[in-house]
Amino acid sequence: MRTFADWALNRAQILGATYADARVVDSRERYISSKNGKVGQASVSDTMGIGVRVIAGGAWGFASTDTLTRQAVEQAASRAVAIARASALVQERELALVPEEPVEAEWTSPIRTDPFTTRVEDNITLLLRVDAELRRVKGVTLAEAALHFRRQEQLFASTIGSVIRQTRYYTGAGYSALAFSGNEIQKRSYPNSFGGQHQLRGYELVEELRLVENAPRVAEEAVALHGAEQCPEGVRDLILDSSQLGLQIHESIGHPIELDRVLGTEANFAGMSFLTPDKLNSLKYASEIVNVVADARPAHGPGLGTFAFDDEGVPAQRTDIIRNGLFTGYLTSRETAAAVGQARSNGSMRAEGWNRIPLIRMTNVSLLPGDRTLEQLVGSTEDGIWMETNRSWSIDDKRYNFQFGCEIGWEIKNGRKTRMLKNPSYGGITTEFWNSCDGICNADHWVLWGTPNCGKGQPQQTMGTGHGAAPARFRRVKVGVAYQT
């Protein structure tokens, strides 16, 4: 890998690049799914290539190749320089990078069991056992389950002298039961929707999730939802479980703090952000009990946004995003940090693979735990609704007005969960919603969820992010607006 990177960097410097970096990425994936008692998909893929990013003439250029001969790698570096010089002809101002010290390092995400040492046949057997348990419940019309493993080995090298090797192992697992009756479909997922739980861990994650043991309850809830009352429409107190709150954080905090979105370079895909620079250290984003961090350090947990160094060679860091309700931080790069008066990037640049340029991406954007037990939070709610597991979401192109639907809800009366509710939903305005938060559960209820499918950029990149959260309560939220009967 080092040889490939050296070929690229040397060629870029010979051609006059003032800065260059190269990422050599070797990835392996295994994805297996089941559907109604049969194997849905079973695939293994391997890919290896190099991406070369340069500054020449005061502008960026990028090119890549999976042909790892000296000629092909040097041609990619030459293309990157040519693209940079062409871009410089229309660039309004010369770009500059905040300083970063060179580093030589190596890091591997810790695992107990390499998922690729498990047999495909055993993976399929596990999924079919889950599938059988789901369909054993009368009324379940569709059962789906999946396992997803990834190993990505990367070498990053740059002309400032950094050489960094990182290997990240990723494991995901989950399933869903769907029940069709009349003209309505109800769905329950475990342990979360959109593929389940995903973390930077080995096969031990699959074992800890107890997939087979939880299947009967999940299936029974999917069927029971058909007999449940429709979520009422109105203004009620709302408690979100940690998985739904993770997606709420992703959409209404994580995306708005991406500084490239704020500055307009992401405007043509999924919009910009209401968090303009004048709001930094002045906007009351949330109530005083709300503290949110962006933390890529391994110490934060095995999130999909965990690493030792980002794809610019910047060390993983913890950044306060919301401190005691005040908006205090963005996700930045070496290029954008100076725009908000920072002397250093906080290490948020990542690329999907060797053939994509790094972008500012969420790391682990997490709500820090509060001081309540779950019993205290529910017990002090007189008239509210508990909602869990995302079903749908919608948010405007400035990340300000939103509407979310969940798979299941329960009414809370006089401090107790009572009747099950189907089609629960809620909506609001980002800052009003977060300012209404008046209770957050403690660390015993905190989970670091993985979101494996965050899309950004053109051509689009799909990236994994992490979001830690414990159940939390929000006062006087508009509910029951998404699904009309």
Image: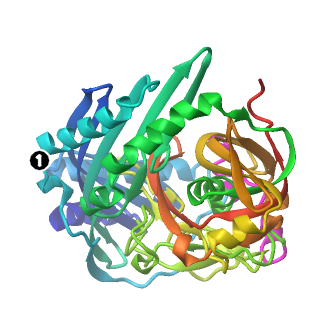
Question: In the shown orientation, is residue 1 left or right of residue 8?
Answer: left
Query: In the rendered image of this protein, does residue 192 appear above or below residue 128?
Result: below
Quadrant (top left/top right/bottom left/bottom right) for the N terminus:
bottom left
User: Front-most of 215 and 149?
Assistant: 215
Residue 362 appearing in the image: yes
Question: In the shown orientation, is residue 52 left or right of residue 29?
Answer: right
Looking at the image, which residue sits at the far top?
182
**Circle 1 SS class:** loop
User: Front-most of 81 and 156?
Assistant: 156
Please state which amino acid type lies under the numbered disc 1.
Answer: Arg
Asked if the stretch drawn in magenta spans residue 279, the answer is yes
Q: Position of residue 84 (x, y in %)?
A: 47, 53
Identify the residue shown where x is 31% and y is 34%.
Answer: 131
Q: Quadrant of residue 484?
A: top right
Residue indicated by mark 1: 119
Mark 1 closeness class: few <14, some 14–19, many ≥20 residues within 10 Å:
few
Identify the residue shown where x is 55% and y is 70%.
Answer: 445
* Segment colored magenta: 261-282
Query: In the rendered image of this protein, does residue 173 appear above or below residue 314?
Result: above
User: Front-most of 282 and 459?
Assistant: 282
User: Front-most of 404 and 79?
Assistant: 404
Q: Position of residue 316 (x, y in %)?
A: 45, 77
Residue 194 appearing in the image: no
